[in-house]
Image (spheres, rainbow, N blue to C red):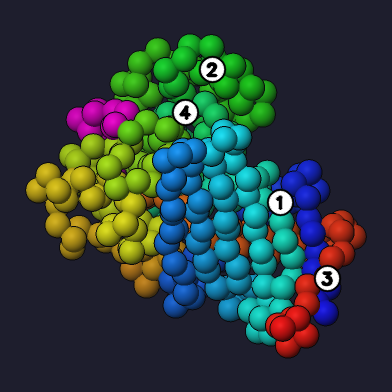
């Protein structure tokens, strides 16, 4: 019988700092760049009741862990539930099962920060942010660990949401966080633009981007939905988290290709290739770069591996047992 840690959502809180999530996820993508296997998400959708079941997988041999993320969203409950199993990459034995919802913004924010660190100008200090939910908070907190932010302009369609977001994040960060009234105000003068929305249409016009801007698009993973327009993709050095996504759910790339703005060769490299030093990142100060972050198990497994070790040290989590197939069958 395998002894497995069951780690509850509330137990994850406080186990690691934002910067530690970023470090763990950066190392996960470094391993991916050096050949660690990962698969893009697989999603099954239902119409009655409407919902989706999603999962994805990755192995991080040097960290010694492998696993994935499975979640159900929608359906009759109109909510989401996340399950994260973690296995030993050498023995194959299960190590932990996480109630995974609470780590989602942390690990997703961390990969956004890794993308900014790999592709944005080193002196980037002004950020334009689209979105005011948990994912936007995660992105902003994480980026603040890799760049010295001075000004953040946040736009969300609902005035009250963007205003309360700005007030909250002003108290948490050294940067001045301001709610702005229009999308253009969020983009103009920004060194980094992040989209963390549920929008199925572009949230800003490419012509507003100034030379040298880095864009992280992370809110959509659907072949017919996008937060950035074809012109933004075409102008950019385009880096996805996984190259396989351009045939599956990288809507911004797929729709730009359908419109004739780009071809398959427009993919510069995967993020892991840049992090591992196998492909260059930014080539010059005026280059526009895009990181298309649809979510992978790389950041999930990297974060979970770190949290598992922290939970063991803190003696957190309930011990449960799993029977190996040799005993159970």
Residue 282 visible within the image: no
| Figure quadrant of the N terminus | bottom right
Cα gap from disc 2 to disc 1, whole angstroms: 28 Å
Which mark, residue 321? 3
Magenta residues: mostly which secondary structure?
loop
Secondary-structure class at tag 2: helix
Snapshot quadrant of residue 84: bottom right
Q: Residues within 10 Å of mark 3 (few under 14, many from 20)?
A: few
Tell whether label 3 touches label 1 (CB within 8 Å): no
Cα gap from disc 4 to disc 1, whole angstroms: 25 Å
Cα gap from disc 1 to disc 3, whole angstroms: 16 Å
Cα gap from disc 3 to disc 2, whole angstroms: 44 Å
Question: Pointer 4: what residue?
Answer: 131
Q: Nearer the viewer, mark 4 or mark 1?
A: 1
Question: Looking at the image, is mark 3 or mark 2 earlier in the sequence?
Answer: 2
Task: Determine the residue positioned at 28% across, 32% down.
Answer: 202
Q: How many marks?
A: 4
Question: Pointer 1: what residue?
Answer: 99
Q: Nearer the viewer, residue 315 or 46?
A: 46
Question: Pointer 2: what residue?
Answer: 161
Q: Residues within 10 Å of mark 1 (few under 14, many from 20)?
A: some
Residue 220, compared with residue 203, is above or below; it is below
């Amino acid at each position: 019988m395998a002894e497995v840690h069951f780690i509850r959502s509330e137990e994850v809180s406080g186990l690691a700092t934002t910067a530690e999530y970023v470090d763990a996820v950066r190392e996960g993508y470094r391993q991916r760049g050096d050949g660690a296997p990962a698969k893009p998400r697989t999603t099954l959708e239902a119409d009655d009741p409407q919902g989706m079941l999603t999962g994805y997988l990755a192995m991080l041999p040097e960290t010694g862990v492998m696993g994935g993320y499975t979640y159900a969203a929608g359906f009759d409950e109109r909510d989401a539930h996340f399950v994260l199993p973690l296995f030993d990459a050498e023995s194959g034995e299960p190590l932990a099962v996480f109630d995974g919802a609470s780590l989602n913004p942390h690990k997703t924010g961390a990969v956004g920060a890794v993308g900014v660190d790999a592709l944005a100008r080193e002196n980037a200090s002004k950020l334009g942010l689209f979105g005011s939910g948990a994912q936007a908070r995660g992105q902003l907190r994480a980026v603040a660990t890799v760049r010295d932010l001075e000004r953040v302009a946040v736009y969300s369609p609902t005035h009250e949401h963007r205003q309360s977001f700005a007030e909250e994040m002003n108290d948490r960060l050294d940067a001045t966080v301001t709610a702005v009234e229009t999308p253009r105000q969020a983009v103009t003068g920004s060194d980094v633009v992040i989209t963390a929305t549920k929008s199925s249409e572009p949230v800003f016009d490419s012509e507003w981007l100034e030379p040298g801007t880095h864009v992280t698009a992370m809110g959509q993973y659907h072949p017919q939905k996008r937060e950035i327009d074809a012109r933004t993709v075409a102008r950019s050095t385009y880096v996805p988290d996984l190259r396989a996504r351009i045939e599956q759910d990288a809507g911004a790339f797929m729709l730009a290709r359908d419109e004739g703005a780009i071809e398959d060769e427009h993919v510069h490299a995967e993020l892991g290739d840049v992090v591992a030093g196998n492909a260059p990142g930014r080539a010059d100060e005026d280059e526009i770069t895009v990181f298309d972050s649809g979510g992978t198990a790389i950041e999930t497994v990297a974060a979970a591996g770190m949290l598992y070790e922290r939970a063991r040290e803190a003696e957190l989590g309930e011990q449960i047992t799993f029977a190996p197939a040799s005993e159970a069958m």
